[in-house]
Amino acid sequence: MSGTFIGMPAFSPPTLPAFSPPTLPAFPTAAKEAVRNPTLRRNLRYATHTIRAKRAAAVSELDDWAALREAGRQIKDHTLRHLDRYLLQLEESVTAAGGVVHWAADADEANRIVTGLVKATGESEVVKVKSMATQEIGLNEALAAEGIHAYETDLAELIVQLGRDRPSHILVPAIHRNRGEIRDIFTHEMSEWGRPAPEGLSDTPAELAEAARLHLREKFLRAKVGISGANFMVAETGTLAVFESEGNGRMCLTLPETLISVVGIEKLVPTWRDLEVFLQTLPRSSTAERMNPYTSMWTGTTDDDGPRTFHLVLLDNGRTDTLADRVGRQALRCIRCSACLNVCPVYERAGGHAYGSVYPGPIGAILSPQLRGTASDIDASLPYASSLCGACYEVCPVAIDIPEVLVHLRERVVEGGPAVRQGAKVTLRPARGHAAERAAMRAARWTFRHPGALRAGQRLASGTRRLVPRTLPGPGRAWSATRDLPKLPPEPFREWWRRTHRPGGQAPADRQEDQR
Amino acid sequence: MRVALFLTCVNDTLYPDTGRAVVKLLTRLGVEVDFPMAQTCCGQAHYNTGYRHQAEPLARHFSDVFKDYEAIVTPSGSCAAMVRELYPRLGDRARAEGRGTALAEQLAPIVPRTHELTEFLVDVLGVTDVGAYFPHTVTYHPTCHGLRALGLGDRPRRLLSAVRGLDLVELPGAEECCGFGGTFAVKNSDVSAAMGTDKVRNAESTGAEVLCAADNSCLMHIGGTMARLRTTVRPVHIAEILASTEEEPLT
Amino acid sequence: MSSRDVILGRVRRALADVPDDDTPYEVAVQRGYRRAHGERSIGETVDLLAENLADYRALVHRTDAARLPGLLARLLAGRGARSVLVPPGLPADWLAGELPTRVADDAELTPHQLDRVDSVITGCAVAIAETGTIVLDAGPDQGRRRITLVPDHHICVVRVPGQVVSSVPEALGRLDPARPLTWISGPSATSDIELDRVEGVHGPRTLEVVLTSED
């Protein structure tokens, strides 16, 4: 099959409803399926292990990595501390450079603004650079509802869109697909809405990339409207930056007449110079390269070069609520590198879809429950989707202590308490389904405050240990379904110590106990 | 030197052999060991499950029990990390919540005096050869808290390498979590079990007879998985290997 | 109330717990990292640039002013280019060799016409040795951004050592943020299939970098 496909596609690009928390199962339920899917497990294991090793090598080239990481943390913290001031400065510099700045308090407002801007151009199709923010707000679906076709142009996003699938990774949204699956998707779906895949397409990555090049080129060349996000915005100069690899970003940022960028308000840095930190840490953390193939930086509009009209839509959508949480706000430092996903043993086995959000993995487990709240089953379960192993914190290039925030959010789930939702102070009720656990924790606390009671319990257990089964009924089955229980010893340590060390030097502690 | 053994609630109840091994080992090295009978739990499970406020009285209790000792030694990386990394955080959070500095002040003195066993041996006692004998092939799993929270580094390996008769083999994917994670093992049992199975398969691939770690919580999960998978590798706490001698070998 | 006011109000309320902080920006961020990594002579810096460019699959050539026109002509001929796009300010003496049909960087040129051009020759604004990066700033010898994007073959001439810096921090200091900037490190690539890097997607699939010495 050859020849360029001309004209409008007969079919709209496929769209899926954005992740809708109320309809999604809790993390453990979703993860169970992934764990039992051998193809998915193999795909994820191969991909994450490959990138882990590469990242480690790329990072080890810089002997000042720790200082870069610390500077990145400080730049982001300082910006967040003065976010109002820097947002106003950004608005001023973007406007002075010929851009138009819009503010969107939530997803609906952002979608309305963008849809209105596209309609005003009279166009009914747009090309998109991969953008987490536009996925987060479900922009493609909002555009489709207004008859506007949004074409994803990043290779992985294309795979996801053609496969009527959902993204499962921040950097590589189709990480759950192997080359054979991608070949099948291209072969069956490309012809539906553009240039078909070449006849006899093989599954070599080079051929698959070539098929995407041919398929998308016609869309780039005729596009009048481009939609992007941005990795960074510089308050001082009004500059936006997009880091990418394929050149689809450059296509969308330079060929169309109108460019609309939807960017979270936390993507700000104060000065031009600050980019020197992130230009070093982002590529090495993300694609594990010294530098990604292409980075585009633009400041407003330039005469006779690139789009004549530039709109910047600044997005809140839960970010200020996150900012209001003194422990959780550090999540806003995130530069979306995805290093935490690639090292996470839970992500590797559960896959990205189980997180029920465009932000999967460890960072998603702390971002989603903050951006969306903890009301749904999925959002209330995400803080527990971690063994707290700390690998994510270790690789984070802006030093987000993800385990700390996870534990903090667990507290919010089980205890409730004050929080901010949509800008308003609210008092959250403790989540349902934790009553038994709460009672057990209280009982354990009481026992542990009363060593005599602990000892009595231990003696009782040891005395009846032959009656203790190796598997458990009820909630305990979650343990004993795959693991034997340890055998109870004939006597706990403290009994042995009491027998063998009395009346030794430990009297003060004993007296303390006996007085209680 | 007189130190307090903080055995931890899990070891006290389920793994008394580890406690006896620590006593034997430290006594052999000339350390006077005390076991304050009022000790219970550091509060880690409460804290990590989201019950920080319930962990606070346990932390205060810990401080009451151990405050008069110049050193507190524990054969558990995760409980040592609870005291060293998270007790200061308990104090900070209480202060941030407008509850004053009392908690922070009460907990501060015990934090630097709390040592994980291998840390205590290498850094405080300054020994790596503890005179142990253990004629077996051993692979070492550095637990997450030991590795990343405490930064134990190569201390456990140096101790194991000095054990006579012991053949130490590298564990593939050693730095990856075993999947225990406290209540994670129950709340996300499928993922936890998958991680545990991979850890056991990696241990099997080394041909070692023994998988050794410095934390019985992880070993309970790994060992439980091993038993279910009917593997020949057995889990042993590092204290029991270091306590083992030619005269009194670990059986 | 406008959404602008809503968001700014939310930000201010969200930070109510944070003590006032008047630390100036210059003091708030400690820049303990290096300006450049390692000690190198100028010659070694240029060598590192060549090595890192090649590591990411750019084709690297070294020449001098006298031999540059001949080299450019040979590269185009070797590729079989029938047309070459030339930005308006490219030094005329670079083009002294025998070249295919020259296409001017004309505002009227549509993307489809641009797509039919085989090759493009440009200069650059700066090149970074540590990362193997060339940066274009749409200067007269580089032209508009799209001309180095749509044609499948890009030849970029770097004057060495004048345009070469060691590191990213040094490069930023030389660049004007008001200009549209394109940072290029090797040809277009993707890691989207099984996280394996494959060269050649939408941008030029062949990037040739000519390091031409100034003396």
Image: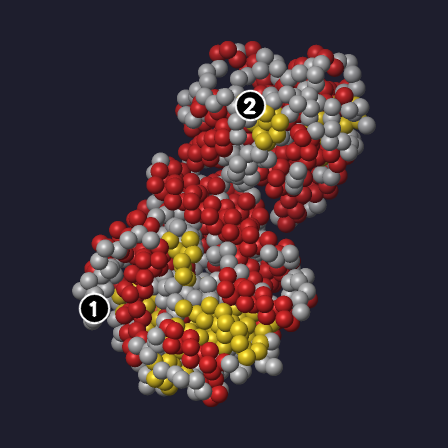
Question: Residue B241: x, y in percent?
Answer: 65, 23
Quadrant of the frame with the N terminus of chain B: top right
- In the rendered image, which quarter is residue A495 located in? top right
Amino acid type at circle 2 is: Glu
Amino acid type at circle 1 is: Gly
Q: Is residue A394 above or below residue A498?
A: below
Asked if the residue under mark 2 is in contact with the one under mark 1, i.e. CB atoms within 8 Å, the reply is: no
Give how far apart the Cα atoms at labels 1 and 2 are: 65 Å
User: Count the marks: how many?
Assistant: 2
Question: Residue A198: x, y in percent?
Answer: 24, 60
* Residue A315, numbered label: none
- Tell me the subunit letter for badge 2: B
For residue A222, side relative to residue A232 (left or right): left
- Residue at 27 percent across and 64 percent down: it is A215
Question: Residue A169: x, y in percent?
Answer: 41, 52
Q: Residue furthest right?
A: B1
**Element under label 2?**
loop
- Tell me the subunit letter for badge 1: A
Q: Is residue B168 above or below residue C103?
A: above
For residue C200, side relative to residue A216 (left or right): right
Q: Is residue B207 above or below residue A403?
A: above
**Disc 1 designates what residue?**
A3
